[in-house]
Image: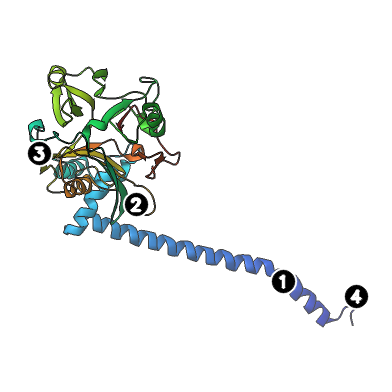
Amino acid sequence: MSNTGISRSSNSIIQLRADRKPAGIYYYSRKKKRLKQTLKGMLSLFLIFGLCFLGFLYAPVKPFEMLRNLWVTSAMTTLNHQYLATYLFSGAEIQEIMDNNKAADLGNSHPSNIKTLGIENNTGTELIDISQKGFKGYLLKVNNPKRVKVAATRYLGEKGEKAEDIAKENGAVAVINGGAFDDPQGNGNGGQPLGILISDDKILYKAPVSAFDIIGLNNDNVLILGHYTLNQIKQMGIRDAVSFSPFLVIDGKPAITHGDGGWGIAPRTAIGQTRDGSILMLVIDGRQIGSIGATLKDVQDIMLEYGAYNVANLDGGASAVLYYNGEIVNHPSSQYGERHAPSFFIVK
């Protein structure tokens, strides 16, 4: 035994204890190592997925070309997410994709092809569920087109209104959103229409341009689609109208014969008329689980299936809404619910 009174074996134990690291440090080290391995694995998977995705987008195979077209057209028709296309494709490539997918310009509809006589007493409406792969919505059939009119916000130029408010103010059974409006960065208040806005034979707004894209009804209750000057609009007796585009069916002829229509996948609203005069109002939900949205070709094909002879695309996206019999029947995509808008098609 040494002078200190501590044996060699005791010294060895003390040294071992001094050299030994706390168990918590080893646990932390192992946890940190596992985390690094997990992050490396996730990064590898992300890179592999990214390379595969880029391969799909650029592959010269038809299914992948369709995916690429949907990707580009969907991105380029948004206000805030065009970078999803511009980051991956050149301006020339994007323009080519957009040009190859857009609806053809078929000119103006011919009112004489629609026969609305003899339907004055047929005042019924029918709400039809629409359910297809990737989206859901509703088609409202209005037998008597005389019941369909355009209503505007009471605060035109200041702020828009919601479909429910428009219904109450006008005693309407049904309401869908209507024409274009100024919407900077998706933050507009819906008060400023674009193009032209006519309600009950009164021109409530007209842009300082020589001609307008017209989606409206004349005094014979025929849906008019076309590009007209103000004088032509007056001569044709157009009683109610908004502006939007494109026209999807003109005189029974579809405008989209290849591609998806050039507007990608989104919530949609459209209006059409059959040859016997019935009005068709279509609203498709989008940007949500169970219904991601529809292409313009989807809209065109649905309307043709239900007998539409003329069809126009209306404002869609977060604005797409259908009010019927006292309630909103679709599911608007905005997290805030219905959007405010300046114009609506209503059924009285």
- Crowd class of label 4 (few under 14; some 14 to 19; many from 20; radius 10 Å): few
Q: Amino acid at mark 1?
A: Asp
Q: Nearer the viewer, mark 3 or mark 4?
A: 3
Q: Residue beneath label 1, please? A: 19
Query: Residue at horizontal 10%, vertical 42%?
Result: 252
Measured Cα–Cα span from mark 2 to mark 4: 83 Å
Q: Nearer the viewer, mark 1 or mark 2?
A: 2
Q: Amino acid at mark 2?
A: Ser
**Quarter holding residue 104:** top left
* Residue 251 tag number: 3
Image quadrant occupied by the C terminus: top left
* Residue 291 tag number: 2
Q: Looking at the picture, does residue 37 appear above or below residue 273?
A: below
Q: Describe the colour scheme in one phrase.
A: rainbow
Q: Residue beneath label 4, please? A: 4
Q: Amino acid at mark 4?
A: Thr
Q: Amino acid at mark 3?
A: Asp
Of callouts 3 and 4, the N-terminal one: 4
Q: Nearer the viewer, mark 1 or mark 3?
A: 3
Of callouts 2 and 4, the N-terminal one: 4
**Quarter holding residue 233:** top left
Foreground residue, 3 or 111?
A: 111
Query: Mark 2 near mark 4, Cβ–Cβ under 8 Å?
Result: no
Measured Cα–Cα span from mark 1 to mark 2: 63 Å
Toward the front, the furthest residue is: 121
Of callouts 2 and 3, the N-terminal one: 3
